[in-house]
Image (cartoon, rainbow, N blue to C red):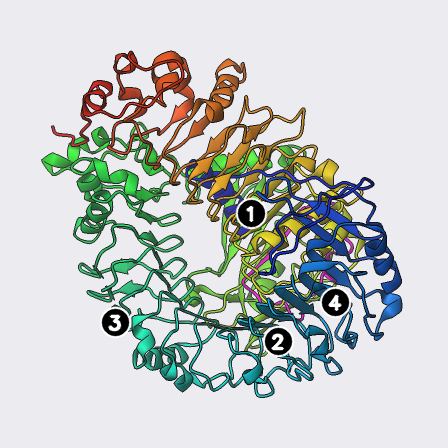
Amino acid sequence: MKYLLAALHIVLIVTVAAENVARMSMARGQNAERIENRPTGDVSVVDACQEDYYPCTCYTYPSETIPSLYVQCTNVPSFASVQSVFLRTTARQVKEFVLTIPSFETNKTIPADLLSGKGAQEITLNCPDTETQLTVDPAAFSSSKDYTNLIRLNTCDLSQMNYAFLANFNVLREVSYASSIDVAQWSGLPFLPSLQKLSMSSSSDFTDFGNVPFSKLPALSEYSIVSCPNFELLPNTTAMKMLRIESCPLFKQWTILAQQSKMTSLTLLGLDSQTIKDALDSVISSPSVGTLTDLILSQNGLNEVPARIQLFSQLRTFSLSRNIISSVGNGSLSFSTLNLQYLDLSRNGLDTIESGAFQGNFGKTLISLSYNRLSRLESSIFKPILEQMESTDQYGYVDIYENPIECDCHLDWLFVDNSNLVDRVHSGQCSNGTSFSWLKPQDFSSCKSGSTISTTTNNPLTSPSYGGASTMPFVLFFLLVSLEAATATFRDGLTCDDYSPCSCEVYQPYGLVIHCGNEFDGHQSVTTHDVQKVFSRTKAQHIYWLDLFLSPSPETDSFDFINIPADFLSDKSVVRIGVGCASTSTNPWRLEIHPEAFRSSGHRMEHFEVDGCDLSRFNFNFLAKTNRLTSMSIGRSVQLQGFPPLNFLSRIISLRIYECLDYQNWNEISVRFPRLESLFLDGTQLGDQLVNDLLGSIASSPTGNDTLQQLSLWENKLTRIPEHISSFKKLSYVNLFGNSILSFPKGSLGFHTGIRVTFLILTGNALEAIESGAFQGDFSEAVIYLDVNHLTRFDSDVYENLLEQMHHSTSTSDAGLYVRNNPFACNDCHLTWLIRDKRHLLGSVHGGRCSNGTWFEDLNPEGYDHCSQNNGQSRDAEFYERIHTTIITFTITN
């Protein structure tokens, strides 16, 4: 049921989430202006796409402070056609140029003056496959030498590559390789004074940097090596500043780290506990122990917090996510740094935190404990941390999303005695599904006498349950699937046979839900052989949901391989199927599914998902005969090879790909899925450019801009609002939670005319400024989340129109503007319009609070009587006292 949980996350996170919408325009066929040169390689003025770039595609992004021009030549017949495009267009430079080698030009040299005298700040060369030998004429991009700062070479054979074409590229900062072979030649590499970074991803034969002429690269200090199974040696240098090594099992040369004195960032992923210990021992023995600011140790199979982390005196980010740390001992999270901003312990199966585990200054730290098994929030552990956070003007908080917290009297210290600290606990939820936001001090009134909290259905701390599952997820699930389930019928009686070692629930009115295996408990794993025996003996012919977390079967599989055989379910049919690989190691198990595995479900299956697997041997042929499949999800998996041209993909209307960090073929989505209504790409860390490329390809596809209704891009390292969003004629839901977008320019949150926005989730972006006119469209029924940002102003030219639309709406929706945890300044007149003149709009503002703790509702309208209509500024202390009617305290006493 991983997809269900993921979908619920998207809905639930709306209570603390945030979303941004951006505009993008694509145009052809007018005149462009000349672009000025800049010696730094940046482009100062970039033309709008006003000319005909066919057969290439041109995009411009109006929300950028300086509009940029992006040209993609991904489906062109020849190199000559590209030259023709740039010969007839007048723009002198472009922000990015992307070329996929034409199929008729395979293994031919990219010719001289490909861009016809034009320049590009970023150049991407994609080969159709690694059988394509990429070669480049020395003068191919000579007109770009003063502008290009990034070059990407993807899916190519580089055995014949000569880098002479980079001569005089004096502002080039990074060269990136993805899924290419014979990379390590570097023949003819010229002197590159500004090159800082080499990035290597998914190169099967890359072993070392031995052939790199380092004397020609004086600025080189950053290395990223991801999913290179044969990589062994780093260069013998002392100039390293940033290093990322992920899923490179043969690399053991950690002594190189002891030589470094300037390292600021170290990311180690997909390794093992001994490797991590060796690496940290080397860093701690080096001068870099006093310079390192970012230490990422996710997905390494660690079962305890590494020792001596307190020695890193400048640490700002420390991540241990996706390990197997079930308990945190006294003093194990002890930090000497005063600058810790992010501490991530999510997805560890963590169930125990000892008193005194956290030691140090956490006033401005975001502590993520999400997706764990914590059942208690003890005062001795969390109160000191929360008090530190509350005592600063920073926005530190503890995130406990997806933990089964027991909401009994042990929480009265928080909700009764220290309710001012509740806002510093994010996404809290009781084990019965009740959100912390629904809990009130009076719910704990019986605790003072020593009794326990009532468990009657009238008590908000409890709610009815079905089969042990919480009511709230089921309620939300009904909202998500009621339409599709309304037509489903189940002739079998809704009763459970003995499905052991699986479990069975009766889920009215949909049917049976079967769980096999436990994602977090390897001792409860099941094999394909176990599942086959279950379905061969049970009678129910139709299952609504089958939720599998599988381990290799000794009878049929190797130790690291899961093979789902033909006729897996013994002629039983399933509507929704989820397959997870219940691996407890750092490397997930490989999954292969026989083409006839789910033959009996071909006419009933509506949703399929896969989670946590190695998909290097996975293909989608087993879904080829489905005729009702409309929803698919792929999560937390590696080596996804892409989507083959199978007919069933054209029926998919909902696609979710989450936390698949090594997947490269994002632009396939627009080609393979022409009818998408919902697209969720969450936690994929794509960045601005890849997101914009992807949305551009969907928007320019024959049907994409007519069908897409929901778009989720949370935690994608976005620094600006994505483009193209206004191009989608039906888009009404956008989720940009947890990115790094600092400002929203005018018009950047514009939706297509005629669309009523439903959800706009913009939470957790460190947002500081919103320009006048940023929001454009119909927001009368919208739920807009701006929680957990850095907003200090609540200006009328930004919010008044939104709130008036919501106020005058006749809809029964929960439309509103949610702004909790922003440090709004209330000591001037800029709030006059809301507090004095338009106070009726306050009902649509939720969680508005001044930086001193006073709620917007408690501000005195009469305190603004001296303010003029133009909201002139007044900051004297007397005014400050006038506008606050009361000093709010939250301690509840009996």
Q: Is residue 116 above or below residue 870?
A: below
Q: Earlier in the sequence, mark 2 or mark 1?
A: 2
Element assignment for label 3: helix
Please name the residue shown 46% across and 60% down the image. Answer: 519
Residue 311 bears which disc, if any?
3
Residue 69, position as x, y percentages in the image: 69, 49
Does label 2 or label 4 sit earlier along the sequence? 4
Residue identified by numbered label 1:
713
Residue mark closest to the camera, 3 vs 4? 4
What's the mark number on residue 190?
A: none
Q: How far separated are the C-alphas under marks 1 and 3?
A: 36 Å
Q: How many marks?
A: 4
- Can residue 573 be seen? no
Residue 636 in the image: state x and y as whole percent: 54, 60
Q: Is residue 628 magenta?
A: yes
Q: In which quadrant will I find the C terminus?
A: top left
Q: Quadrant of residue 289?
A: bottom left
Q: Nearer the viewer, residue 654 or 592?
A: 654
Q: Is residue 76 left or right of residue 482?
A: right
Q: Amino acid at mark 1?
A: Leu
Identify the secondary structure beneath mark 1.
Answer: loop
Q: Residue at x 45, y 86 (%)?
A: 253
Mark 4–mark 1 distance (CA, rounded to whole Å) = 34 Å
Where residue 334 sits, quadrant-wise, is bottom left
217 is higher (above) or lower (below) than 569: below
* Mark nearer the N terminus (3 vs 4): 4
Residue 318 part of the magenta segment: no
Q: Do labels 2 and 1 touch, CB within 8 Å?
A: no
Provide the residue designation for mark 2.
Answer: 556
C-alpha gap between disc 2 and disc 1: 39 Å
Closer to us: mark 4 or mark 1? 4
